Amino acid sequence: MVDEHLIEEALKARDKAYVPYSKFKVGAVVKTKSGQIFHGCNIENAAYPMCNCAERTALFSAYAHGETEFDTLVVVADTEGPVSPCGACRQVISELCPPSMKVILTNIHGDIEETTPMLLLPGAFTPKDLQKEER
Ligand code: THU
């Protein structure tokens, strides 16, 4: 079931985007297992590579508030179909969220795709990959 309330919150988060360069606003909401909601928006910078995506803003904000157990992530933008998270965000989502967690991708026209971190980034680089063998 798609949570309309969470989508409305993601649209509110999108209104807070700071996008003087791309003019492309993205909103995200992460709901924690304890039921709290954290907003995220994209925040750009004149030094372009410093831009932070909405998904990462939401997840990092939750973490900064001591919330690390997630239930749902919603992302919204003005795209033709449901917005597609970038590769960097897929990697961060795959590390911080449970593999089968609900991820709702949508757009301002109401198109919706429901997916999971596992489906967004099969073969993600994981903490396990950092374990070195004895040489
Ligand atoms: N952006 C996001 O916030 N999330 C995505 O999943 C895709 C891209 C932002 C980054 C940049 O501020 C703007 O959209 C254009 O790439």
Image (spheres, rainbow, N blue to C red):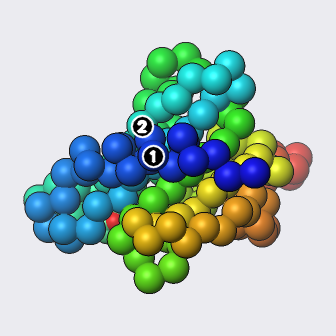
Mark 2 and mark 1: Cα distance apart in space: 11 Å
Q: Is residue 115 left or right of residue 65?
A: right
Regarding residue 112, the answer to whether it shows in the image is yes
Q: Is residue 27 left or right of residue 62?
A: left
Q: Is residue 70 above or below residue 133?
A: above
| Disc on the earlier residue, 2 or 1 | 1
Which SS class for mark 1? helix
Q: Which residue is mark 2?
A: 39
Residue 134 percent location from the top left of the image: 88, 46
Pointers 2 and 1 in contact (C-beta within 8 Å): no
Residue named by callout 1: 8
Identity, as a three-letter code, of the amino acid under mark 1: Glu
Up-down: is 110 above or below 37?
A: below
Number of other residues with Cα within 10 Å of mark 2, as a class: few under 14, some 14 to 19, many 20 or more: many
Q: Position of residue 30 (x, y in %)?
A: 55, 39
Around disc 1, counting alpha carbons within 10 Å, would you say few (fewer than 14), some (14 to 19), or many (20 or more)? some
